[in-house]
Amino acid sequence: MVPYDDSRPNSQAMAFYYVAYKYTFSSFTYQYPDHYEIFTKKGTTPPPENSCTITDGRVIEGEKMTPDASAVIRADQRDREMFDVLQGIPTSESLYGNVLANNYLHQYKFQEKLGVCVYDLTVTRDYTFHWDPGRSVPNPNGNGTITIPDPQVDYASVPYSIRIERTFSYWVVDKLGVYSIDSAELKNYAFNGEKITIHPAGYIPPNVTLTRDGKYVADPGPGNYTAPSKTLTGGRTKPSIPSGESAELTSLTESKISQVKVNNDTLIFNGQTLMNGSVVERKTQDPTRVPDPTIIGRDVLYSPGNMIPISKTNKMSQPSSGTITYKPLSVNYNAAPGDTYPIAGINPVTVHTPVVNYSSASDDQAHNQKTYPNYNRMAFILDRPFTVTIPTSGQHQNYPGYGNRDYAKYFRSKEVYFPFDVYSGDKSTFYPKNTWINIPVGQLTTEFFLPVWVDEGDYTVYYRNIAENAPGVTPTQQDANFDLINHVASDTVDVEVIGRLYDFHITDIADFNWELVFRTQSGSMTPTGNSYWTGLLGIDGAPRGNSQPFTLPILPGKNPLEGTKNVSVKTGYHVKFDLKSKGNMFSKQDGIRITPSFTFVSRDGRTTMPVDLYYNDDHRKFIKVGSPEDTEQRYVILNDRLRNVPEEELTDTARYKYDNYYTFAEMNGVSRDLFIADYIRRFTKEKTPVGGFALMLLPEQIRTFIGPKTNLPPSVDNARANAAVQKWYGQYSLPGDPYVVRAGENLAEYSRKNGALTKRDPIFLKDGYIVLNFNIESIKNGNLSQPHLQYINAPLMNQWRMEGYNRSVQDSWGHTFTLKDGDIVFYNADKSYKDDFQAEVTH
């Protein structure tokens, strides 16, 4: 018991009794006031029989503690997803995670409190009794007695036991748990760190207010009291207390005791009063249930822009999982803490970073001189540029976002591999053979340069395009990494490295009328530097630097000396020439085959026909050029006085032969220096047979090596590089005094019909020119049946024309001649070298 204290806030004009109920929550215990009972006034002792009792009544409870959560992991952007993550999404692309769930969880228990306050008290009433029984006294008249008034008064104080009951009820919150969304977590291999945490955005948690002041306040009651006194008047007898006094006093006491004041706890949920805490008498309003949650909007737990790191290798259908965490509101009472709940049914994600490889290489058909081109291979020409094309676009799997498109975004690198040495296109960088060369991803076409020392033949160029997430460079897959195990797309291109045949020119003519064209003075071996080239253009069609008249064919008007404009070459005089080749034309069995043919053209150029040539020797007459009887052998001396072969060429050639053509035993102890000296002094001055009038074969004995020797990469064999470019020296002359007949004419039959033949017979063509034509071919390894390169008659190109040969030319008289490719010299059909040696006679 505590005394009434007027100084306490909200004190009632009574003493009160504080009842403490204990509740345990989490790890601590606290007390709270539950209700108040009646007290007596200060200085008095409350009657122990006056008390209030509380019992539990109805319960209103409920819960929604399942989040009903679902989630998806998909490709950005939402509603416009470029990729189907079930089939594949590349690294560097981003994912979004989206979680749907109840906007809150709840559990609650509302407890009704039923009470009764019992007032057991004593009410005392003072009674005054009046009655007059009378008194007999002698009658003064003497007649007996008379009754005289004898008023009586008596007093009594009667206690009455009165019981008053006051019933009441109110509601309190026995348990309240409301939980707002704290965060969600989604896990998948594709995420950076394999998970993302999503915090709510634009989310409004439940607004809950709980005031735990549900209570009752009972009237303390009047206590034992004395009711207003009552006078009872009787007659002759003393009056008795009426029977209704107890009921009357009970009614009186009832009027003195108010109804119990009660109020609920106050609970407001999102502005809605679920439990009204207003003070009322006797009975409060029943509470309303906590409303169930709804599913959040899709923007609340939405996380876009989660880029897949390039460290993630390709993996199929990586599983997903997730959780959502709800946290308790601070207002919660007597409820469990928040919890984390699993999210089931989240879709898997397939990581597949695509690369494609549809590479190609240039096909240099415009410079392909092969006799039999291989159309299944790209032509790479020695000492020329070539290009490789490595696109980043092409066909991949027909998944959303894949298909036929540009995949450069996903490339780590592009690389090309040549099984032969190459230079960069500007020759600034050398790449040794069997090197993977990195190509900038954004550069589709790259130019390289093929060194002249690369061996001719078939090769395969390899390409690989490496995805940004590749753990290595293997395994690879052709065209595209269609299968997830592959992070590299590969391609191959079959190529053929091919040499060149070029730079034919006439360097000397034995006819005396032409001596000073080529020599600085008569009888001198010093060259003027003049020579007659195919045309004004070089090997690849660029200007060579020469000018007219120093182009082929040689005909009247091409002699630049004064007074010689009408001079042509007489039959029997040889012309010296040389030409070059590039490639593997450095073995003992390699050579140049030249097939001469002859055309007769009239002096005015109007009549042209193929012809056969005949000649006489010391023992036979009318030997047809090209017939079995044509056994005249022609020779070439490499180190001829008037050929002017540089000694450096001869030295380089001798050195290569010494190192590559002979074994140690074959050299029999001869040193390299001695061999070189002997080669220059003796071997190169010997006659080398080259064939006859109808066919020439320039063998290795009249070939020198003129390839590069300086500024070579360290890995390159200098001797091999020098041997990669060859120079072939030759000379040719028509028979000294030929007979010219239309091709196919049967000279024997003509003779039978017309008698013995003489030079003057009309069958022999005169008053014109014999045009010498060369068909030039290279022969590898002695294979005469399959010439390697063609100077003129290759299916894909004509080097003769590349060098600017003009098929129409005018002589010094203005006559126009239509030419054939390979026409090199107009011989005067009516003049022979013999004319220069006839004895002079006086006229």
Image: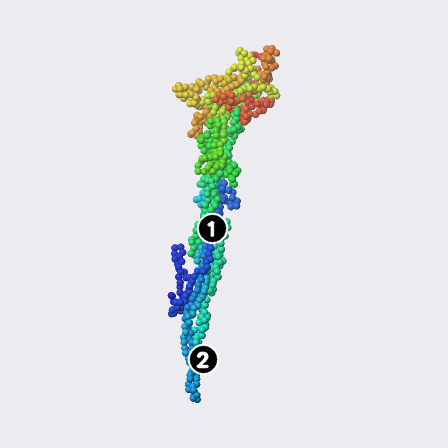
Q: Residues within 10 Å of mark 1 (few under 14, many from 20)?
A: many
Reply above or below: 664 against 186: above
- Considering every residue shown, the one lying at the far front of the view is 144
Instruction: Judge by depth and name the residue closer to the eye, 535 or 267.
Output: 267
Single out the mark in the foreground, 2 or 1.
Answer: 2
Q: Are marks 2 and 1 in contact (CB under 8 Å)?
A: no
Specify the label residue 67 is tagged with.
1
| Helix, strand or loop under label 1 | loop
Gap in angstroms between the C-alphas marked 2 and 1: 87 Å
Q: Which mark is residue 786?
A: none
Q: How is the image coloured?
A: rainbow
Q: Please provide percent x and percent y for residue 201.
A: 48, 50
**Does residue 673 appear in the picture of this structure?**
no
Q: Position of residue 479 (x, y in %)?
A: 50, 35
Q: Of 184 and 117, which appears nearest the observer?
A: 117
Q: Quadrant of the C terminus?
A: top right
Spot occupied by residue 642 in the image (x, y as percentages of width and height): 49, 19
Sooner in the amino-acid sequence: mark 2 or mark 1: 1
- Label ID, residue 235: 2
Q: Residue at x 48, y 45 (%)?
A: 346
Q: Helix, strand, or loop for circle 2?
A: loop
Going by the numbered disc 2, the residue's amino acid type is: Gly
| Circle 2 residues within 10 Å: few <14, some 14–19, many ≥20 | few
The quadrant of the image that shows the N terminus is bottom left
Farthest residue to the bottom: give it.
Answer: 141
Residue 713 shows in the view:
yes
Residue 763 image point, x, y percent: 60, 15
Name the amino acid type tagged 1: Pro
The front one of 444 and 119 is: 119
Relative to 206, residue 393 above or below: above
